[in-house]
Image (tube, helix red, strand yellow):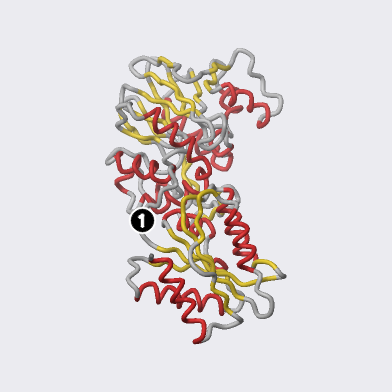
Amino acid sequence: MTVALNPKVKYIGVDDLDLDLFESQYVVPEGMSYNSYVILDGKVAVMDTTDARKGEEWKANLAEALEGRKPDYLVVHHMEPDHSALIAWALEAYPGLVLVASAKAIQMLGQFFEGIDLEGRTMTVKEGDVLELGEHSLRFFAAPMVHWPEVMVSFDAADGALYSADAFGKFGALSKCGFYGRDDDDWACEGRRYYFNIVGKYGAQVQALLKKLAGLPVMTIRPLHGPVLEDNLGDYVSLYDTWSRYAPESEGIFIACASIHGGTLAAAEKLAEILRAKGAKKVVVSDLCRSDVAENVEDAFRYPTMVLAASSYDAGLFTPMYEFIHRLQIKGYSKRRVALVENGSWAPSAARVMKEMVAAMKDVELVGPVVTIRSCMKSTDLPALEALADALLA
């Protein structure tokens, strides 16, 4: 679809409602949007392309928006294939087109498009450079590792638009979640899952970008995924600031459980019951074996305290818990409190492995006694669970 954002700027992005896994790993039940924009001024700038899956639809949107004009520039904020698959096509379709990108992005082009001829077709931009289009102009800011090294964002002072690349994006097609952020019932839910799983490792780089942009009179944020943001921009920026500082967003305790036959899960649920009875304001229990790992990563970062409850397995750790902690490690999990519950019928080993994995994380405090369950929770296990609950609430 094409949407006029103002008299000279149009949205030409596409929705993908048939995608099962974004980046071949994240479930997207509400689909995905691949956002792209056109600035129609004295010069015409196309802002990124799209995923190959939606190439023909994007070409039609572009042609409709151009109304017979030829684009002068193709601005590439991010080289990931879901935003750049049509670069070679655009250069061939419009012989006068100049590709505008960071030096790193231009270097990467040959990795994605074999034999592409860029002679005289590129303009390298760096921090602070400005591309004049007429009334509109784009000022570029380097955003390395948010979340690839070549990323740039751009700011158009004419309408206060920040073209934010993958920053401030979220899962979900616009036809499902709403075109504008105000139409989205709960932007933060999928925005949070998107941030911690896609960008989350690079909090320091996000902080650096937020500081660069702090003085700009931003009136709207136009990301490469998710709704266009125009209202309450401070709320979105505040969330990004919290997330990228690895600060807890909400008070509560997250209990992540990996149980083979249900005994460990029963203990986790009993601990949650004890915590609530002792006054815990929020306790969330998730069965890692039967839930979306990306949502579990999201909740691990959302709350300040987490309990890892897992079965022992092959003299080590039950696989779903191992994979979950590994994801937390590579996403930069830090500045949290963690407690351990293990289960083992003859030689409990889960706590040992979990402790080793947690010890590799930055600024993570192990809390309370390790609780060991033997096969099934019994009345004799309750004092240990009570003691752990007290330690978690201390």
Residue appearing at x 46%, y 80% in the figure: 383
Rendered location of residue 58, percent (x, y): 50, 36
Residue appearing at x 37%, y 50% in the figure: 188
Which residue does the numbered mark 1 point to in the structure image?
250
Residue at disc 1, secondary structure: loop
| Total marks placed | 1
* Residue 194 or residue 377, whichever sits in front: 377
* Residue 147 or residue 11, whichever sits in front: 147
Within-10-Å neighbours for mark 1: few <14, some 14–19, many 20+: few
Rendered location of residue 16, percent (x, y): 50, 47
* Residue 132 or residue 334, whichever sits in front: 334
Residue 300 vertical position relative to residue 386 in the rendered view, above or below:
above
Quarter of the image that includes the N terminus: top left
Rendered location of residue 281, percent (x, y): 33, 66
| Left/right of residue 279 with respect to residue 381 in the rendered view | left
| Left/right of residue 215 with respect to residue 253 in the rendered view | left
